[in-house]
Image (cartoon, helix red, strand yellow):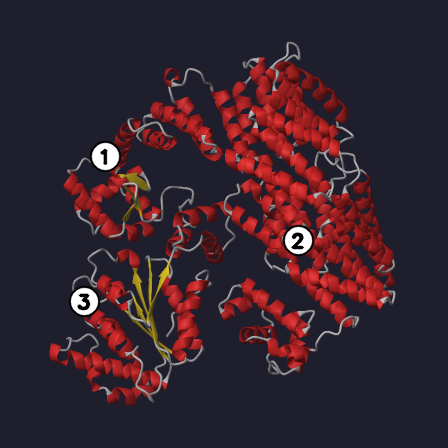
Amino acid sequence: MAQTFGTPFIGREDELARLTGVLERARAGDPRAVLVGGDAGVGKTRTLAEAATQAAATGMTVLTGHCVDLGDVGLPYLPFTEILGVLAADDRFAPAFAAHPAVDRLLGSGTGTAPDPGSRLQLFEGMAGLLADLADITPLLLVLEDLHWADQSSRDLLRFLLSRGLLQRPRPGAPARRLAVFASYRADDLHRRHPLRPLLAELIRLPAVDRVELRPMADAEVARLVRALGTDPLPDATVRRIVDRAEGNAFYAEELLAALPGDFDPASPAMPSGLADVLLIRIEQLSETAQQVLRTAAVAGRRVEHGLLRDAVQLPEDELESALREAVGRQLLVPDEDAAYSFRHALTREAVYADLLPGERVRLHGAFAKLLAGHGRSAERAAERAHHSRESHDLADALTASLEAADHAQRVGAPAEELRHLETALELWPSVDSAARPEDGDSVTLTLRASAAAARAGETHRAVHLTRAALARAGSDADSELAARVRYTLAGNLLRIDNLEAAFTYSSEALAMIPADPPSYTWVWAAATHAMAARYVGKDEDAARVARQALRTAEELRLADAQADLMISLVGLDAHNRRTPQGRDRLRAARELARGAGNIPVEMRALYNLAVGCYESGDLDECLTSLSDGLDRARRAGLLSSPYALELRYLQSLVLYTLGRWDECARAAAADAERLPAAGGFATGPALYVALARGDEDAADRARALLDGPFDWMATVVAGIALTDDAAVRGDAEGAVEWMRGTLATITGDTATDRPDVGVRLAALALSAVADTAAELRLTGDEAGARRWAGTATELVEVARATAAKGEDGSRQGPEGLAWLARAEAEWLRARSGPDVAAWEKAVAAFGYGDPYELARCERRLAEALLAADRREEAAARARAARDTAVRLGAVPLREALDALIRRGRLDGAPSAAERIPLLTAREGDVLRLLARGRTNRQIGEELFITGKTASVHVSNILAKLGAASRTEAVAIAYREGLVEPGATAST
């Protein structure tokens, strides 16, 4: 019987595919064996159970034998006795048992005395003959679990069966042996002298034996497992913490999750007691000296250098080496090339550390702190020392070391690490006597520095929180220059989270606190910040006046980076803005000034505005050049998570999407997903547009996830576009209009304009669904309903017109915005009176600047309009062109809509369904039969042991080959052509 599980099978698709491939060969008469290795808890049993389930589903008889840890007193042949007991109870196999009486010695009590050596060969040959005969009766899968616990007799019998018996080619004319053997073992239990090691080395050399190593699961797969196992939705932070601690081990993830309803906090260094007990069992098998070494290494952390461990543990060299050899042999520690040792799994280290006595911990941490103080001044050393000093209660040294670590992190461009060390220093500051604190520092300046590090790390809300803390710490006693600096820093951080009115308030306060004369660095930067804030709240005259005055002062003081920042602001306030050649020339000059001054954030601001100007002007190639320059600069400086770097990454992704380079867009998003800060999810937003256009069923859920957490303007825009379009494609006019209105209401907020530029795109997308609904109502004779939706269309087109006439910065839209306006106008006419050829021709021409997907969507509508006007040849040409684009991009819903139009309008002499049906593969036939039962892509994937995404690809191929516009039509064609049996459709 195959073992069953109540949780979904996640990951391991490649390993399962290898096993099922072996099963297919075995059923065809090619006997094979597979040795499946992996650490405890990594998923061996579950993977074998899935393979066994598939084997049973194809008619194979599955037999499982378990090896059990009985210490030095093993029961001989235990797994084979278990298998024989099951076989003997099946009447089908009685003749085979009668033909091989030698195996009777393993039956009866089942664990009796082993046969004497003289009859041992008879037993082995009898067992091989019995299994060969059984394989003639039924295809057979033998599963042997936990070979690392196998007794010597079982290992010997397995060696015989695989090397001389079962897997040998039968003599000519004899029936093929339909048999497979899967055997699992724990790789982490195989110490150097483990008796299974030589057997594995021997078996793997056999031509009919393969080995499959189950590596730790990918983080994304562990996250899917955790969410699937959870009875209630889990916060992303909780899932991430469990994933980080489990390190790819499914059992560890399940145990960490199971402890959540109790007193377990996933952010805590503690772990569930049950899991700790499991991990400590292996530790307790070591000698006392080896356990002492492990305890000392656990205090050092996940990894410890040999010299540092030697000095801390204070053992004679030969005893230390013997203990380390024991720990390495048991695969608890792993040596590396740098004369250091790491715990094989972080949770093992946590369990050992948690088992230490409190005094033992303090003593060992103090020892490591003293040792590290004399081991150089690197960032890593300072961070380690700060940790050990804090845990040993030497807070003054912990503060000093934390500040040293922050300085090192700043020098190497690691803002996230710098922030972590600075926040540690801020926590320690009030607990350290003033005489032991740095002479040249104070808590306000330190907090401002931490806020700057948070901003560079992309933690914008954290930056705001820290700057507010600096404001509170400064109080009324701060000098005017420091008070102004705190306020304009807070204003800049508030701008990044789109709290614009508050930003303007604080920038105004900062500017009022210090005089413009005498000229000063602080006043220039306060003015530069105020110019940005004033512009964002619509006070352009105030912004321009302050910026010009500050530019003169910056030139006088030779503050090149401030000059650059002010020039960028003035380009946005000038008639020659970033969309004009003159404006972009001034942005290039600002970039050179910032680069010369070494101010990378200002340089990236210049590059971002250059890229946006090119994008808005339709010059996408030059846009990509500026984006590449900006991201390369950010990468070299370690600032890829900073605000402008995230904006550059988003725009790069958007340009790739717009140009139809969708695979590049998706690959870039996948690469960025693990590196982006929590607030940077919007940067991969265009990949969501790709997923939606390709029919990904999960894309809408991922778009909604962008709206979780604190408000973010860009995340709201990305989600709004994706969810409005998703509703429109599904024909949900009410949903599309609701998402469009809600998004505009949310992002307008406290801005001075009620016309954010994205309004024209959102309006056009919603109008598509509104026009579809109005057209359907007219066809059914519901004129009142059609007029009602036509009224909604008029409301939406007015939003598009108003935005295009005067957007966020008061200027007319560029080529992209005008293209969306043309589409909105054409959709409005379609909603009012039907498709209009001239309007759609204008929309097609407008998207000719370089957006193939939107061009194809407009060509589809133009083909409909031409068909309605009886201009069939032109309609066919447009439809074919749009379909070619949809196929190239993988835009499945659009391609299906075009196929339906071509078929409905008889615009193409495409081959008949009957001519295409022979092209269906075997796998597509399986998918088609499940389609006929009403299964979703996800259900198809689960039943066929493939991913939902792979199932979606098969469904798309089936629709294309059958010439069907929908799943329902594909099933109807399949019935008509006899591809599925009548009555296959389920009621679900």
Residue named by callout 1: 312
Q: Quadrant of the C terminus?
A: bottom right
Q: Earlier in the sequence, mark 2 or mark 1?
A: 1
Q: Picture coordinates of residue 331 (x, y %)?
A: 27, 52
In the rendering, at what x and y percent does residue 601 appear?
Answer: 58, 30
| Residue in the image at 42% along x and 80% along y | 59
Position of 397 with respect to 967 (left or right) is left
Q: What whole-number distance in Å separates the C-alpha atoms at marks 3 and 2? A: 65 Å
> Which residue is at the front of the view, 536 or 505?
536
Location of residue 650 (image quadrant)? top right
Give, as a three-letter code, the residue at label 3. Gly
The structure residue drawn at horizontal position 63% and vertical position 16%, both measured from the top left corner, is 523
Question: What residue did someone put label 2 on?
Answer: 660
Residue 296, above or below 978: above
Q: Up-down: is 867 above or below 986?
A: above
Q: Inspect the image, locate mark 2, and give the three-letter code of the amino acid beneath it.
A: Gly
Q: Of the residues tagged 3 and 2, which is closer to the observer?
A: 2
Disc 2 element: loop
Q: Position of residue 129 (x, y in %)?
A: 26, 83
Kindly check if marks 2 and 1 are in contact, taking CB atoms under 8 A apart as contact. Answer: no
Please tell me whether mark 1 or mark 3 is closer to you in this view: 1
Q: Quadrant of residue 62?
A: bottom left
Q: Which residue is identified by label 3?
A: 74
Q: Give above or below for 265 relative to 413.
A: below
Q: Report whether residue 745 is seen.
A: no
Helix, strand or loop under label 1: helix
Q: Could you tell which of marks 3 and 2 lies nearer the N-terminus?
A: 3
